[in-house]
Image (cartoon, helix red, strand yellow):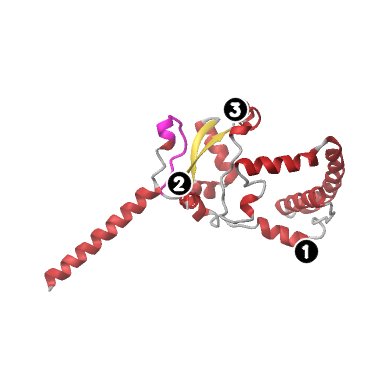
Amino acid sequence: MDVLGLTNYATTLALVAVLILTLYLFGRRNFSYFKNLGLSGPEPISHFGNLMEMKNLGFTKAFKYWREIYGDIYGMYFGVVPNCVVSDPEFIQEVLVKKFSNFVNRTLFEQDEIANVGLASARDDHWKYLRTVLTPSFTSHQMRAMNTMIQTCADNLVENIDKLAENGEVKKLFSAYTIDVIAATGLGIMVNSQKNPDDPLVTKAKDVFKFSFFQPLILLLFCRLLENS
């Protein structure tokens, strides 16, 4: 019986070791992508890629730090998903303007029936259809009308910025300004959320953009599986 017990124990340890190794290798399966292309970048860690470094340094500081080390073009990982980061203005113009038709699609962070057909997440022909529908909204006449609304929102921002900046509320203030601009230009509603943060529209809008660092993490780790499902 003791021999059987030891055998079962050894088998269990072996299975656990194999499982841990499998998970480790699964979490690193894409990490040779940029090395094979000869592109440098920050060293990723299993499953998380470079997300933890981004969390520790802060989103903006992390990309600034990596640019100083690796230059204008380098590779990094959102979870297990490889991403090429480009800071060279000419390269960016090539991608976003000259060859834009080849770079329409964006990474999906949500598996949601409604969110995935929106302008930011639409793909291929559906995106082109939405662009055709929305283009008339951005004529010179419409842009001039929007400019007046944006200027009103900016005036409210200037009026409030001196008061709130002293209290460290700049982030909330600019978030409110963004909501004001979207509501004014997209819905034709002047909500002035900088002074009325409890407005129902403002509350719902904040809920849409509210997320923690770890909310999209699972989707980032396994997004390849989700896309293929």
Which residue does the numbered mark 1 point to in the structure image?
200
Instruction: Tell me the residue at 56%/39% (across/down).
Output: 63
Between the C-alphas of marks 2 and 3, the distance is 25 Å
Question: For mark 3, does the 10 Å Cα neighbourhood hold few (<14), some (14 to 19), or many (20 or more) residues?
Answer: some
Q: Residues within 10 Å of mark 2 (few under 14, many from 20)?
A: many
Residue assigned mark 2: 80
Disc 2 or 1, which lies upstream in sequence? 2
Disc with the residue nearer the chain's start (2 vs 3): 2
**Lateral position of residue 205 relative to residue 212, left or right:** right
* Residue at 55%, 36% in the rendered image: 85
Measured as percent of width and height from the top left, residue 59 is found at 58, 45
| Mark 3 in CB contact with mark 1 (< 8 angstroms) | no
Foreground: 88 or 97? 97
Q: Nearer the viewer, residue 117 or 201?
A: 117
Between residues 102 and 10, which one lies in front from this camera angle?
A: 102
Whether 71 is among the magenta residues is: no
Query: What residue did someone put label 3 on?
Result: 91
